[in-house]
Structure formats: C-alpha cells, structure tokens
Image: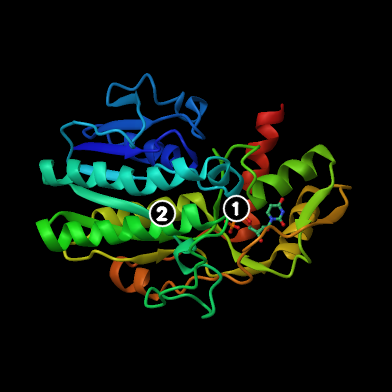
Amino acid sequence: MRILITGGAGFLGANLCERLAKKQDDHIICLDNLQTGNKENISELMNLPNFEFIEHDIVNPLNLAVDQIYNAACPASPTAYQADPVHTMKTSVIGILNMLELAKKNNATLLQFSTSEVYGDAQVHPQSEEYWGNVNPNGIRSCYDEGKRAAETLCFDYHRMYGTRIKVVRIFNTYGPKMNSEDGRVISNFVNQALRGENITVYGDGKQTRSFCYVDDLIEGIVRMMNSAPEILGPVNLGNPEEFTIMEIGERVKGQIGSGSEIIFQPLPKDDPKQRRPDISRAWELLGWKPQVSVRTGLEKVIEYYRGLMA
Ligand code: UDP
C-alpha cells in the first residue's frame, strides 16, 4: 500500500510514520510544510527504502497515487495555531478539500485527525460523540475549533455526495516523545520547566481538567480506525479517560522528576475549556481499543525523552 501522512514531521504524524514504516511492504509518504513539524522527528526514517519525505503545504493541491491518507496536518498547540490563525483555518478547510479530492480520485481511504476541541468549552461531561459542543465562533481558539468542525463537515459531505471513503477520529490531549520542547502544551511545558529547575507555570487557578493519553496508545487507536470496516466512519473519540486537574499534573511532574521547581500561577488564556474527559465507549465497541499506558508510566517515558534531548 501507498500511505500518505500529512503533517508527518509533527508530533503525532512522526509517531505514526515510525509505526507504519516498520511494515516494509508499505510505502510511506510523509508530507509536511515544516511550519511546526521538524525533520529531526523523522531523521531515523529518512534512509529507509520504503519512506519518502515531501515538503509541501496541503493548502496547495497535490497529485499522488495513494491508497490511504492520514490527514494530520495542522498546528495543534494553542500558541502555534493562534500565531497565524488565518493559515490555521486554511490548513483545516482548504487542506481537507485538497485531501478529499485526492482520496476521491484515488478511491483511497482518508482518516481525518479531528479533535476534542470540536466540543469547545463542553457543558456535557464526559464528552461522547453525540454531543454537538459549545464552541465560540469568533474567539481566539475558533480558527482551530471551527476549522476542524468544518473539516468534519466536508468529510461527511464528500462521503454522502461522492461515496468517498472517510473516517474521523476526535483526538483528546496526547503527550509523548517527538512533541517539541517549545510546543507550548502543558505536559511538554511542565516537564521541561521541571527538568531545567524553572518555575512551573499553571494558568488560572489550575482547577481546570484534562485527560491525557500517551502517544503510543493513541497511534494504536488511529491505525485500528483506518483499517476498520468501510462502513465505520466515526466520529470516534480517542483519548485516555483518566482525568486530572492541571494543578495535579504540575505536582505529579514535579514529584516524578524530584524537581525543586516552584509552581506559579499565570493568567488563564481566553476561552480555555474548564473540563475535558472522553467517553471512549464507541472506540471500545467498534475497535476494541482502550489505552494501556498509565499516566505515571507515560510521564516516565516522556521525562526520559526530554532528558535525552538536553544531554
Ligand atoms: N496550561 C498551563 N500551563 C502551561 C500550558 C498549559 O496551565 O504552561 C493549561 C492550559 O491553560 C489548559 C491546559 O493546561 O487549561 C491544557 O493546555 P494545552 O495547551 O496543553 O492543551 P488544550 O488547552 O488545547 O487542551
């Protein structure tokens, strides 16, 4: 099979490339505009005969022969997607149009990396796929949230209009190796701050919650979804339902590293969701998937990773 991974040099994309390139009879095409992706993330794959890298922005059309498309391209850290919000929206909306056209032409299966952000500042807890969400249409997070919502719409409309083979997963907070140390998301921030002995920056009062999934678990769910029966379209939530306050995460990171860092408070960014936890019963029913890695073990692995980068 010829497998295209857009955003393949980014955090999730590169972990997926690594996983898929192991199967030597598949040809992996990793595509990235290197806006937030990093070639270091795929450096070990570059010499493999079944792996190729193309520098390209999915906002521009693309013509390739492919059997499967994983559409992971889009900055996902709030700081990164808010840096150029117009381009973020274009990546989600024009990008998915280009990828759906490619899937349609090749009769390929497209799996869209959607997000728990489609639920916005959720008023239903935990969030199941039936919940339609509570999203600000014109706030600072909207370029990402509304872009990803529009992308889901286009996937389902291509399927209804043209029979295009689509699958949609909604990814909840994920952490692990290959997330840039400067990414800005909470676990990479806290671990790097604690390792450097800097202050750990909790935004707001730290009572907001998130549920954190280790990247290997997430990638397993994504691969299962792509290879599921054609009638399974989703959306399917993928995430770890273990829920923590951000303050608890700060304390755990500090404790596991044995760091002397102080926890300090900084202003809460606008529209920051208060509570988030996935209902993953659909993923279990359809894919037999649930996370295996505890937050303690996952944190140990990611601490080792960032330690290694500092050495
Ligand atoms: N956060 C924090 N300190 C940081 C980075 C993030 O307290 O240095 C908080 C952020 O305000 C949010 C939560 O951690 O409530 C998760 O933020 P992240 O950017 O990782 O992901 P998202 O908000 O998209 O879930």
Q: Is residue 310 left or right of residue 293?
A: right
Dots 1, 2 in contact, CB < 8 A: no
Nearer to us of marks 1 and 2 is 2
Q: What amino acid is found at the position of numbered circle 1 in the picture? A: Gly
The image's colouring method is rainbow
Quarter of the figure that contains the C terminus: top right
Q: Secondary structure at mark 2?
A: helix
Rendered view: 80 above or below 236: above
Identify the disc placed on residue 298.
1
Rendered view: 285 above or below 152: below
Q: Could you say where residue 8 lies in the image, as x and y percent from the top left?
A: 39, 36
- Alpha-carbon neighbours of circle 2 within 10 Å: few (<14), some, or many (≥20)? many
Q: Is label 2 within 8 A of ligand 1 (CB to nearest ligand atom)?
A: no
Q: Residue 153 appears in which quarter of the rendering?
A: bottom left
Q: CA distance from mark 1 to mark 2?
A: 30 Å
Q: Could you say where residue 17 lies in the image, as x and y percent from the top left?
A: 37, 37
Quarter of the figure that contains the N terminus: top left
- Give the residue displayed 66% in from the left and 52% down from the top: 186
- Alpha-carbon neighbours of circle 1 within 10 Å: few (<14), some, or many (≥20)? many
> 44 or 148: which is nearer to us?
148
Q: Is residue 78 left or right of residue 11?
A: right
Identify the disc placed on residue 147.
2
> 17 or 4: which is nearer to us?
4
Q: Secondary structure at mark 1?
A: helix
